[in-house]
Amino acid sequence: MTARRSPRAGSKAARPPRAAGEPAVLRVLVTGRELPGASFTDPCTPGAAREASVFVGVQRGREVIEEVRADAREVRFELEFRVGEKKDGSPNVLGPFAQGPVDDRFFYLSWGVGERAGRTRMFRRLKVRLGHLTWAQIRRSTSRGEPLRVTLRLTDARGGPLCGSAKPPFVAWETG
């Protein structure tokens, strides 16, 4: 289960059928647009120095992977989750990209600064919630072998990296 930047991430490769009781494998294609650039001055920190060499990546467990410079035109990550069932029958999103308590699952995009990808220091994170996903959306996606798609506008209203919880108009889900 990896995140990857890939022009083929939206391919329609068929998935093998799953055995009864086995968690579904849900793919989520994350597209980040309107990135803030590789440098910015943090308006939340008075007297802050200009941050340079800004990267964005996806968090897997505690590790940030697939970092891309924040001056890219667009960034894409393809995430895989296992989806089981909670006691109440609703979807339970699982796997190394799933963060948070069972009743509030999400994934993180993490912002870091450093000389190069893989050698950054995280300074902000963006939480993208998954709890709104329904069984109908998940089944439709998995039966078609197509990922759910989420598009994020990654620059906040002040011109810096978007952080906190992604909310409209900064996040848009296409669930077919």
Image: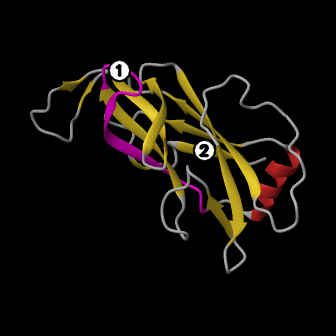
- What is the x, y in percent for residue 102? 55, 69
Task: For marks 1 and 2, give the one nearer the viewer.
Answer: 1
The quarter in which the N terminus is drawn is top right
The answer to the question of whether label 1 and label 2 lie on touching residues, with beta carbons closer than 8 A, is no
- What is the x, y in percent for residue 161? 36, 35
Task: Decide which of 61, 49 is in the foreground and name it.
Answer: 61
Q: CA distance from mark 1 to mark 2?
A: 24 Å
**Numbered range of the magenta stretch:** 114-132
Identify residue for label 2.
Answer: 172
Q: Amino acid at mark 1?
A: Ala
Relative horizontal placement of residue 38, taking residue 78 as reference (left or right): left
From the viewer's perspective, is residue 73 above or below residue 145? above
Which image quadrant is residue 23 in?
bottom right
- What residue is rendered at 75% in x and 32% in y? 10
Q: Is residue 24 visible?
A: yes
Crowd class of label 1 (few under 14; some 14 to 19; many from 20; radius 10 Å): some
Q: Which mark is residue 38?
A: 1
Q: Mark 2 falls on what kind of element?
A: strand
From the viewer's perspective, is residue 136 above or below residue 73? below
Relative horizontal placement of residue 16, taking residue 43 as reference (left or right): right
- What residue is rendered at 44% in x and 39% in y? 64
| Residue 61 lies in the magenta-colored region | no
- What is the x, y in percent for residue 92? 65, 66
Q: Is residue 161 visible?
A: no
| Residue 127 lies in the magenta-colored region | yes
